[in-house]
Amino acid sequence: MNSVERARGLIREAQEVFRGDAATHRQLSDCLDRLDEPLRVALAGSLKAGKSTLLNALVGQDIAPTDATECTRVVTWYRRGATARVTAVYDGDRTTDIPVLRPNGRLTFDFGGLTADRVDRLDVTWPARTLRSFTIIDTPGTASLSTDVSALTVDMLTPQDGESGADAVVYLLRSLTNTDTAFLARIGEAIGRESGPLGVVGVVSRADEIGAGRMDAMMSAGEVAARFAGELERTGLCQAVVPVAGLVALGARTLREVEYRALVELAGVHPDELTTAMLSADRFAAPTTGLPVDAALRAVLLDRFGMFGIRLAVTLIRLGVSDSPSLAAELVQRSGLSELREVIDVQFGQRADQLKTHTALLSLLRIIGGAGRSGAAGVIATEVDRMLADVHGFTELRLLGRLRSGALRLPEESLAEMTRIIGGFGIEPTLRLGLDPDATPAQIRSAAIEAVQGWREWAAHPLLDRTTALACTAAARSAEGILADRPHP
């Protein structure tokens, strides 16, 4: 029986124990339903970090308001739905539909007479393909001027009652401030107490602005991301740090043909002339600037791509990109969004069942803990504790964090191999073992046996500290898991 089915069985046992308690039974039903829902990924970060823009880029549609309005001060859940609909949950248990408006072409949610302090959350359903696999939770800024608004994000990520929070977190950084590190430390503390999300990925957001929109902006952002990653390694929290130019990514994923034609016209301008026109955003958009694209459309390009995105698109067209789909694909790749989506897939998507099971078990523990952990409930709680400690997938995810903390005393090449075997580059057996995708079952089995032996030898090394020895044992168990799925012929 896999971990999902074991968790499902424990929740059903708890339902039997509390069948006479309507409120607790309802919480347990929600906990059970959680296992069949998409993975929940929260976007968190400071004010103006670009969370909503990144959300739109990940989804490939303009579904989240990006202006600083009432709706950006509320936790908002984006789920897959047949039609676009926004519902506000307010004053505890009341709900109302919120109109979706596009004044001046910008999407916003009209709260009417409601204020953000009355709204507990927004539920947005949208017919977007990405939302089939992920429910995305957009949170208020962690450095909000209102401590109550910041607390909404903390409470959602580290719930204390029976509710399920996020399964994983994408944390956006513009700089590594004390507020950021304190918030990440709080998530880390929750993870350490087994009460928070297991997966956390960092994003250097609005990355093109780091290089002031220059053509080498993403290179500069990559260096910043590496520095942030190095500093965060001491916490062992973020499993990766990726630079992303969210505005460029969103513009690329929603590129219109009229915008592509305008970019082609700009690419036809003499380089010196265009460079002069783009010395500043004001000069580029000014009606008096002599360019073949009218000023109104230039202003749209600035709003949609920024100076860096326009420069990058023009350069790509001059280098031979000859149609709008090709340009969009190149811009997405160079924006960093492709790398982020790959990291999310490896760290979150491929481990969706493990992450959801972890969240469901924590919710179950909080529910039956609140109802009293004696008798049958105590037996279930003990089994939940055992699962949280023993399920190897959870061990792998925690170990991925420790690998980045510098706490393990192994040679660099061995640390890289450990990252690979525990699924840091993907959970397929060939990826874990460093084999070609078309490796034969015999080759996979042979490599797995060698990995088990190698990591067992490391674990028994007399000079290793206990933490490193336990990590080596976990790596051996990962290799043993591959063998267990491939019995000897």
Image: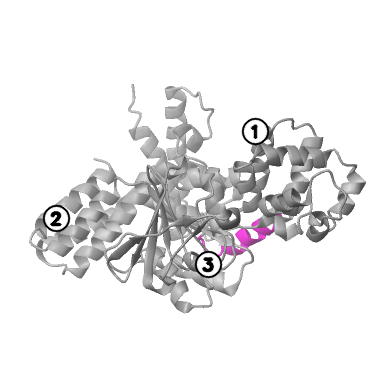
Residue 99 placement, left or right of 329: left
Q: Quadrant of the C terminus?
A: top left
- Where does the image place residue 22, in percent across and percent down from the top left? 13, 62
Residue hosting label 3: 69
Tell me if I can see residue 367 in this picture.
Answer: yes
- Where does the image place residue 389, in percent across and percent down from the top left? 31, 56
Q: Identify the element where label 2 is drawn.
A: helix
Q: Identify the element where label 3 is drawn.
A: loop
Residue hosting label 2: 15
Is 230 contained in the magenta span?
Answer: yes
Number of the label disc, if any, that sits on residue 394:
none
Question: With respect to residue 41, does 268 lie above or below?
Answer: above
Q: Residues within 10 Å of mark 3 (few under 14, many from 20)?
A: some
Question: With respect to residue 486, does 405 lie above or below?
Answer: below
Q: Quadrant of the N terminus?
A: top left
Tell which tag, 2 or 3, sits nearer the viewer: 3
User: Which tag, 2 or 3, sits closer to the chain's start?
Assistant: 2
Could you say which quadrant of the image residue 482 lies in? top left
Assess whether mark 1 and mark 2 are in contact (beta carbons under 8 angstroms).
no
Task: Please give the range of residues in magenta.
Answer: 223-237
Residue hosting label 1: 325
Residue 81 placement, left or right of 327: left
Q: Main secondary structure of the magenta part?
A: helix
- Where does the image place residue 95, in percent across and percent down from the top left? 31, 63
Pick the front one: 462 or 184 = 184
Which residue occupies 71% across, 38% down? 260
Pick the front one: 40 or 419 = 40
Which residue reaches farthest left? 20
Which residue occupies 43% across, 71% down? 116
